[in-house]
Amino acid sequence: MQRTSKDGYRSRSAYKLIEIDNKFKLFQRGQKVIDLGAFPGGWSQVASQKGANVVAIDTKQVNLIDGVEYIKCDIVNELEILKERLKDQRFDVILSDMAPESCGVRSLDHIRIMFLCKLALNLANYCLACGGKFVVKVFQGESDMDFCNELKKIFKIVKYFKPRSSRSESTEIYLVSLDFTKNRFFS
């Protein structure tokens, strides 16, 4: 955490997004971005500093960041309400750093994060602009490849990426999906 406080970031995960952006060029000034699982705000900070207009969504209130709109929402129980609130808006980038509370059983934690990934994809399919980008955290396990294959149905490019700032022993990895082909069916 020493580096985060020195650089002014709210979380270590900010460095993960910086690495992802350096590799995949996610952000351009003026883009509209959704940050799912935004608390404590590190990813929202990075996207906002890149000139994006950010909507940060989390069950916990995130302390204010200039230029970031906050929606306190539980995507698990309020996805349809969230979609209604965002209707008629299209976003250029959807980020999901959501993760369940860890129970310590890798297979169960994997199932739980994959459920969150599917909710994030459901939202992306609803409000991501054609050509948009989608970044989602997964824990490697039994079904991440199936999820990757679902992404390949609606994005032209899908890549696995493990930032150097991730702990080496962690099963955490990111799926970076580029060039959304718009609302094709997914299961």
Image (spheres, rainbow, N blue to C red):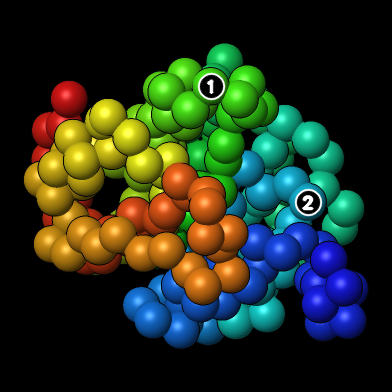
Between 85 and 111, the one lying in front of the other is 111
Residue 40 - label: 2
Which residue is label 1 attached to? 105
Say left or right for 14 vs 154: right
The answer to whether mark 2 and mark 1 are in CB contact below 8 A is no
For the residue labelled by badge 2, is the local secondary structure a helix, a strand or a loop?
A: loop
Q: Tag 1: residue type?
A: Val
How far from the left and from the top, in percent, is residue 185?
12, 33
Residue 45 visible at all: yes
Q: Residues within 10 Å of mark 1 (few under 14, many from 20)?
A: few
Tell me: 125 left or right of 17.
left
137 relative to 80, above or below: below
Considering the numbered disc 1 on the image, is that residue within a helix, a strand or a loop?
loop
Residue 43, quarter of the rendered image: bottom right
Q: Is residue 27 left or right of residue 57?
A: left
Q: Residue at x 46, y 84 (%)?
A: 22
Location of residue 47 in the rendering, given as x and y in whole percent from the top left corner: 60, 71
Residue 177: x and y in percent read 28, 59
